[in-house]
Image (cartoon, rainbow, N blue to C red):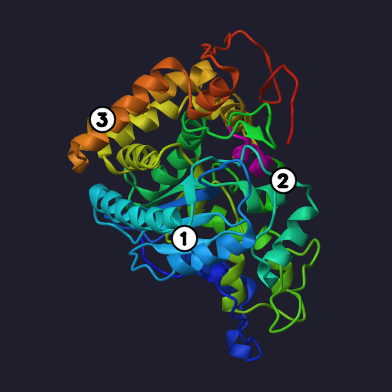
Amino acid sequence: MLESQEDPYMSDSVSDCTESHSVVTEAEVDALVRGICFKTGPPRYLGVEVEWLVHELRQPRLPVPSARLEAAYAALRTLPLRSALTVEPGGQLELSSAPAASLMECIGSVSADLDAVRATLRAAGLGLIGYGQDPWNPPRRFLHEPRYDAMEHCLDRAGPEGRAMMCTSASVQVCLDAGYEEPGPLGHGRRWWLAHQLGAVLVAAFAHSPMARGRRTGWLSTRQSLWTAMDPGRTDAPTPGVEPRAAWARHVLDSPVMCVRASSGPWDVPENMTFRDWTRSGSPPCKEDLDYHLTTLFPPVRPRGHLELRMIDAQPGDDGWIVPLAVTAALFDDPDAAETAYRTVKPLAERAGPLAAPRNPLWRDAARFGLADPELREAATVCFAAAAEALPRLGATTDVLDAVAEFIERYVARGRCPADDLLSSLQGHSPARTLDPSHSRSNGQFHGKDIRT
């Protein structure tokens, strides 16, 4: 079941692994991962993590000075919030809801917290804005701590995308229970598979990051392109077609170790050492090291007892995050909608091919073209309609139903996504964007110049 717990990745504590009983073997890691990462049962809870870029109210495109951010966050930490408030390396703000027993409980709780956060920031001349990737500013690190020094060092080996992810990206992450042990529309095996196929549709529909440093990047979800370009051992999903627990346990063991924590001084950043290698070394890891390692893996769907869907860009507007939360919850937790979504995205699996998300052709096209891609648009049309029909059964209020209906009319029905609005506002017009389905694809991309960040 989805549980409330402090993210160990946000902790500076360093465990003492000197006692022999605390060391974990390769076999123990396999058993632990299988036991803790998929807690099955009836889907009863859900949650959401909303990330935001913080901006100056008077000059939104300018970066906020560090001193102003520090003062603002000090004030925010005095608020009696139900959600956990954390700060990302570049100064982005994140609110992580407590597990909620219903969709409306989750929306109500986070909305109230956001109202309080915005009021405090407004008094300081600051505000929140939802972009998947900062359209204007280069990466700039706000937090300077051993864990982020180590992360930057590690990710820099694969290229500049890691720094951009750390410091200029933001998302809406939906957290769902893993599902029943048994098969069926709400079974954990089906939900795991669905998350990786439907995930591409969610990327396309909610793409909202077409720019970086003031220029078009050639992607409607530049944020997703960053994940695709980073170290595949850290950002890829496990091998498709394998039983979820076995696939994730193998993935955890074979993924590279980001860092080895130290009680003082910089943390060691090993090169080409997997967690499996570490368990076989002369100084093997302990349970706390495994816990930490799990939080340094960034696949598009991360099992943490529950399923954490990480592929959705931050959305425009104060309440834009509600639509992806509501649609995703409906497509997973309503049996009829889940069955419709499964049947709808099943043909897309052939297009995805044997490569894991987000590196396969389906996910790359979703990030590049959004709903201008005909197959993704067709799938989104059916899935969003199923979600809209299911939401009253989940207790959604008229306001939520209207927000979803407006999103469908404004974007899905027209083959558009929020990124198109940003691009159109800069061009001064709103041209229709379509792709001829007869266009050939090469390595999952329509022919055309690839403008990378």
Which is nearer the eye, 277 or 293? 293
Q: Which amino acid does label 2 sit on?
A: Glu
Going by the image, does 128 lie left or right of 287? left
Q: How would you classify the magenta stretch by its main secondary structure?
A: helix
Q: Which residue is drawn at 68% across and 84% down?
A: 263
Going by the image, does 391 lie left or right of 52? left
Contact (CB < 8 A) between labels 1 and 2?
Answer: no
Q: Earlier in the sequence, mark 1 or mark 2?
A: 2
Is residue 105 a member of the stretch shown in magenta?
no
Q: Reply above or below: 378 against 217.
A: above
SS at mark 1?
Answer: loop
Q: Which residue is drawn at 30% across and 32% down?
A: 403
Q: Reply above or below: 318 against 68.
A: above
Q: Earlier in the sequence, mark 1 or mark 3?
A: 1
Label of residue 304 in the image? 1
Q: Dot 3 corresponds to which residue? A: 402
Q: Give the range drawn in magenta.
A: 221-228
Contact (CB < 8 A) between labels 3 and 2?
Answer: no
Q: Position of residue 141 (x, y in %)?
A: 68, 58
SS at mark 2?
Answer: helix
* Separation (CA) of disc 3 from disc 2: 37 Å
The answer to which image quadrant residue 156 occupies is bottom right
Q: Dot 2 corresponds to which residue? A: 161
The answer to which image quadrant residue 259 occupies is bottom right
* Separation (CA) of disc 1 from disc 3: 32 Å
* Separation (CA) of disc 1 from disc 2: 25 Å
Which is nearer the eye, 212 or 280? 212
SS at mark 3?
Answer: helix
